[in-house]
Amino acid sequence: MIVMREDATPEDVSEVVSRVESTGARAHVIEGETQQVIGVVGDVELVRDLALEVAPGVDHTMPISRPFKLASSQVTHGRRTIVDVGGRKIGGDRFATIAGPCTVESRDVMLESAHAVKEAGAQLLRGGAYKPRTSPYSFQGLGEEGLKLLAEAKRATGMPIVTEVMDVRDLDAVCEVADMIQLGARNMQNYTLLTEIGRAGVPVLIKRGLSATLEELLMAAEYVLKEGNADVVLCERGIRTFETAYRFTLDLMAVPVLKELTHLPVLVDPSHAAGRRDLVESMSMAAAAAGADGLIVEVHPDPDHAICDGPQQLRTAEFADYLARVERVAEVAGKVPAVGV
Ligand code: PEP
Ligand code: MN
């Protein structure tokens, strides 16, 4: 990590970058709180031989001790990343809500959900066209047809779309519609997919794997960041423990601990963690109290007849009141309410 002086000129920065790149290493220029920082990923010996600590504009160089480098909070000197998704901000002092049905199941459900969550104040719209299902006999998603319906919902409401990609072969088609790609829990360690998402340069929401440690989650983020894609958001969605009373165990301590380890925004998915609608509101409030940068939550007009995840989806009719209550907690935790923004 190369920390530039506060008075370093843009020429000093580009000179350091080109010297770093002459060794075959990659240089990532990151805006720190008061000065620029250049994160270097490459052969340590070759970069050290450049003696950059005495180059014009350089304050000092230091190794990053953590295994994740670009994701590390060390690299931004305390500055938190704010990810722009189709004009909506995730991170910083905002509390962002991504809401919508589990899957894109029909035009009516998609459009009705989209209008309802927008009206209630959610900023981004979710809905999976490609669904990771435990059983190969379960509904697998509408695929390209689902993407078309998401595009229509976006045209109708102006809401940016968050949708999952499961396979590199679908990445181009998904990128046509998605403002943010969701990398599901089951794919968190699909390194080929992470690399390709990094190259695609589209914002990505990486969900924590069912049995992944925080370090493994941050290493997944590192795969995307390493390719030059800085728009990464992390999501705690429950992990597998010995407890069977609910679907997963929502690990809310992950929120403050991730925020200490990384500069990336952290969201919480209370729906998939709980698997039960009655737990979603309290866990959403707890996530907000823990300092989460927002939520991704499932909402459906008629969950009793939903194709998948019916028991955990909130009803569109109750969503506005739910969100207003959760935003009150977010406000107590220091966030500016985003409802109506
Ligand atoms: C989802 O959000 O649609 C989903 C399948 O979540 P997860 O990958 O966390 O299980
Ligand atoms: Mn779901």
Image (cartoon, rainbow, N blue to C red):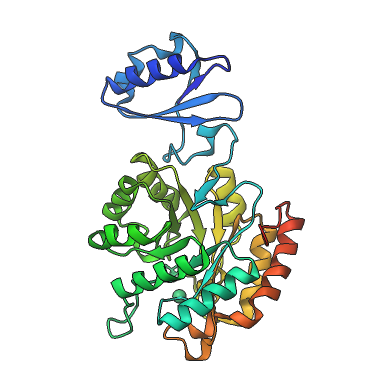
**Residue at 26% from the left image edge and 63% from the top image edge:** 170
Q: Say which quadrant the C terminus sits in.
A: bottom right
The image quadrant where one finds ligand 1 is: bottom left
Q: Is residue 251 left or right of residue 47?
A: right
**Residue at 28% from the left image edge and 85% from the top image edge:** 137
Tell me where residue 316 sits by quadrant: bottom right
Quick check: 285 above or below 337? below
Q: Nearer the viewer, residue 335 or 64?
A: 335
Tell me where residue 313 sits by quadrant: bottom right
Q: Is residue 184 something one can see in this rendering?
A: no
Q: Position of residue 1 (x, y in %)?
A: 45, 26
- Which residue is at the far front? 156
Quick check: 299 above or below 182? below
Count of marks placed on residues: 0
- Which residue is at the far left? 169
Q: Is residue 199 left or right of residue 82?
A: left
Q: Nearer the viewer, residue 91 or 194?
A: 91
Q: Position of residue 196 (x, y in %)?
A: 28, 50
**Residue at 67% from the left image edge and 74% from the top image edge:** 320
Q: Position of residue 15 (x, y in %)?
A: 38, 15
